[in-house]
């Protein structure tokens, strides 16, 4: 139980109405390190009743607790204090995130720096509410558009970027004046517990932030099937997102959904070869491919394809897979044995469909890695657009390769997905690059790069990748209602029936 002594993870782990409490029905969950399957922490497991209490606390804090009416400067100050506390606790939180998710320490530290940047960004943005005056043509009327908090928000996050994804939701929600109930993934709840401890230290008022770690179908369902929640912000799988949207529809609850993608990385023959190989490897294999925007679908121009794929396979085979906590590891295990089994089944399906294995395709041979959920970086050549391995999200270190002959074909293949989260284009021809980034129907398109994001730029998807945007001003707008105030400064007798 490596993390038992970590002060940020001291129990109890449910945070409701400003108090750390045990679940009503008792119960704990074992949290495991995917690097060796060892139990690293026991976390209180919320049930439906706890979710109900948390929603009640958030509702009361919204209605009577004063948070929505708190001066923007105070809300911004809370976010800034939280950012400072995160910076102070960067090392223990990075360690927690690595032991919980399997990602390398280097990645966890980058995640935390990004989280700090997001809290700072929304602290700055909180004061720019986007209110505006509307010219009605009548000088006696003052017509104003103002933005108000949407209300109680259920924030449901996944396991691949637990702290980061939750922060992309909590920071703008608090900036907007909403109150929240946070539900981290049951697989990786630890860094969110730490974050809520820091929010408490930063002075968040009771009921404004509530935390209910627990099972998706139990706690998640309780949070998404109630009229007491005004907005559900969810990041996770497409099937779960669809189920949540269906439940939300019963109460016309607003939804913001980020549901992953099957993201093309398009390499033209005129691209810088070495840079393109690096970018394709990073895009596909960072965090063992468990990234919603992973570039797991390589589209490469026919004339360079054989050489390019040979080089990719050679380099993929050289990636050092190992425990995230070991600085020598370049990438870590998959998040759980169950998830690895799903990835293995998808690769087997791809091979049965006719894909040709040129790298990986198995667990590492190293006996020291036998207890962890490791899977080697895998390259599948000779794939076709209609294969399931090409169309369905694998969420593992698996790169499929298709070849194209013309720019038009590259566009057609790049848009041949039901998703639309992200795409990358690699070319040395600036005019072609511009044509491509406009033609691709994805929420983010990288030209001669793959993967970066920044707090000020919107993140989200076209198509089945979701609804709405996180980050940027739109990420704040998700948590705001728009109100039109019509003020007649010279009321007079009149009206339709006068
Ligand atoms: O995610 P789930 P899973 C994709 C990826 C992966 C697949 C399944 O392809 O293989 O999804 O992963 C909560 N009501 N992504 O099953 O179930 C759950 O507790 C309310 C892409 O692990 O979507 C967790 O907190 N909530 C993705 C969160 O939903 C429910 C990142 C996400 O879990 C629920 C992760 C329910 N009925 C997986 N059921 C991305 N967009 O990056 C589960 N949850």
Image: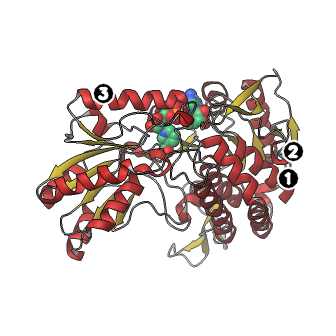
| Circle 3 or circle 2, nearest the eye | 3
Contact, mark 1 vs mark 2 (Cβ under 8 Å): yes
**Observer-nearest of 132 and 209:** 209
Please provide percent x and percent y for residue 482.
Answer: 59, 58
Please provide percent x and percent y for residue 191.
Answer: 70, 46
First in sequence: mark 1 vs mark 2: 2
Q: CA distance from mark 3 to mark 1?
A: 51 Å
| Circle 3 or circle 1, nearest the eye | 3
**Is residue 197 in view from this perspective?**
yes
Q: CA distance from mark 3 to mark 2?
A: 49 Å
Q: Secondary structure at mark 2?
A: loop
**Which residue lies under the disc numbered 1?**
205
First in sequence: mark 3 vs mark 2: 2
Q: CA distance from mark 1 to mark 2?
A: 7 Å
Query: Which mark, residue 18?
Result: 2
Q: Secondary structure at mark 3?
A: helix
**Which residue lies under the disc numbered 3?**
349
């Amino acid at each position: 139980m490596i993390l038992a002594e970590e002060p940020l993870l001291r129990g109890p782990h449910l945070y409701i109405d400003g108090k750390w409490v045990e679940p009503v029905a008792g119960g704990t969950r074992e949290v495991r390190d995917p690097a060796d399957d060892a139990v690293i922490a026991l976390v209180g497991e919320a049930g439906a009743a706890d979710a109900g209490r948390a929603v009640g606390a958030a509702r009361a804090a919204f209605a009577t607790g004063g948070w929505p009416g708190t001066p923007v400067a105070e809300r911004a100050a809370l976010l800034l204090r939280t950012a400072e506390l995160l910076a102070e606790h960067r090392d223990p939180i990075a360690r927690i995130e690595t032991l919980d998710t399997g990602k390398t320490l280097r990645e966890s530290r980058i995640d935390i720096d990004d989280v700090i940047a997001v809290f700072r960004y929304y602290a700055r943005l909180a004061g720019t509410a986007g209110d505006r005056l509307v010219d009605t043509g009548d000088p006696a009327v003052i017509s104003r558009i103002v933005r108000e908090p949407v209300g109680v928000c259920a924030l449901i996050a996944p396991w691949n970027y637990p702290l980061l994804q939750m922060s992309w939701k909590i920071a703008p929600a608090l900036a907007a004046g909403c109150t929240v109930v946070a539900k981290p993934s049951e697989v990786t709840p630890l860094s969110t517990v730490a974050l809520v401890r820091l929010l408490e230290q930063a002075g968040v008022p009771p009921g404004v932030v509530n935390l209910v770690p627990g099972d998706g179908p139990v706690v998640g369902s309780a949070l998404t099937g109630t009229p007491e929640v005004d907005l559900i912000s969810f990041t996770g799988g497409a099937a779960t997102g669809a189920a949540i949207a269906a439940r939300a529809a019963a109460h016309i609850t607003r939804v913001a959904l980020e549901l992953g993608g099957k993201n093309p990385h398009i390499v033209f023959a005129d691209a810088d070869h070495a840079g393109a190989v690096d970018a394709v490897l990073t895009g596909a294999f960072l965090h063992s491919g468990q990234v919603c925007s992973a570039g797991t679908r390589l589209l490469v121009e026919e004339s360079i394809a054989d050489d390019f794929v040979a080089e990719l396979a050679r380099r993929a085979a050289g990636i050092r897979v190992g425990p995230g906590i070991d600085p020598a590891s370049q990438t870590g295990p998959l998040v759980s044995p169950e998830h690895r089994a799903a990835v293995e089944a998808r690769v087997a399906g791809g091979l049965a469909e006719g894909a040709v294995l040129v790298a990986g395709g198995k667990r590492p041979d190293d006996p020291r890695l036998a207890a962890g959920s490791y899977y080697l970086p895998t390259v599948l050549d000779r794939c076709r657009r209609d294969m399931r391995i090409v169309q369905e999200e694998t969420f593992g270190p698996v790169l499929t390769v298709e070849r194209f002959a013309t720019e038009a074909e590259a566009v057609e293949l790049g848009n041949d997905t039901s998703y639309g989260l992200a795409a990358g284009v690699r070319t040395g021809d600036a005019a072609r690059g511009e044509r491509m980034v406009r033609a691709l129907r994805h929420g983010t398109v990288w030209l001669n790069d793959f993967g970066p994001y920044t707090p000020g730029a919107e993140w989200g998807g076209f198509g089945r990748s979701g609804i709405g945007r996180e980050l940027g001003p739109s990420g704040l707008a998700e948590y705001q209602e728009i109100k039109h105030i019509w003020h007649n400064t010279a009321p007079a007798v009149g009206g339709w029936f006068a």
